[in-house]
Amino acid sequence: MDTTWSEKRFSKLLGQSIFTVIKLFILQIVTKEEMPKGFNGTYFMSLLFLLSLFLTSTYSSGLSAVMTIPRYENPINTVEEFVKSDLYWGATQEAWITSIQKVEEVYCKFYIVLFI
């Protein structure tokens, strides 16, 4: 099949456009020759630049780390703090709790209840 001159030009322009968009999203410089001509081209590239700037700054700033809510205000260091946290815990066997099942301390009884 013979491709016409306009089809070749279209595929070349499409390739250049895709390359320009990729350059924007990795924050590379777009030269004047790569910019589309006219008002519509300038408007489109301005919007595309703002979109790429927003997305790349959001990604690189670690927005998810800033917006993550910690589960605990303080670390759990004692059995009492663990029982107050109401976290369930588990193990592969019940042998983990056999040594503390007959202990009379209140916290140990709740500690056993939290075992899965």
Image (cartoon, rainbow, N blue to C red):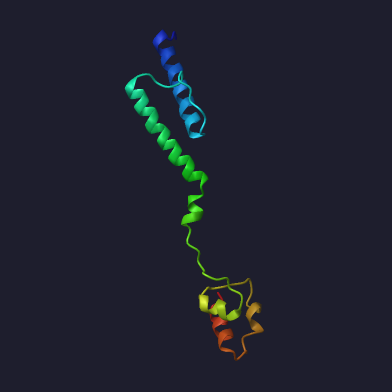
Q: Quadrant of the N terminus?
A: top left
Quadrant in the picture for residue 41 = top left
Q: Is residue 33 above or below residue 59?
A: above
Query: Which residue corresponds to the image point at 51% horizontal and 69% vertical from the top-left?
Result: 73
Query: Which residue corresponds to the image point at 48% horizontal and 42% vertical from the top-left?
Result: 57
Query: Which residue corresponds to the image point at 63% horizontal and 71% vertical from the top-left?
Result: 92
Quadrant in the picture for residue 5 = top left
Decide which of 3, 106 is in the foreground and name it.
106
Query: Which residue corresponds to the image point at 52% horizontal and 79% vertical from the top-left?
Result: 84
Residue 102 in percent (x, y) is at 62, 89
Q: Is residue 20 above or below residue 64?
A: above
Residue 99 in percent (x, y) is at 67, 84
Q: Quadrant of the C terminus?
A: bottom right
Decide which of 84, 69 is in the foreground and name it.
69
Q: Residue furthest left?
A: 39
Q: Is residue 100 above or below residue 65?
A: below
Total numbered labels: 0
Q: Is residue 4 visible?
A: no
Residue 34 in percent (x, y) is at 46, 20
Q: Residue furthest bottom?
A: 104
Residue 27 in percent (x, y) is at 51, 33
Q: Is residue 51 visible?
A: yes
Left or right of 6 in this view: 74: right
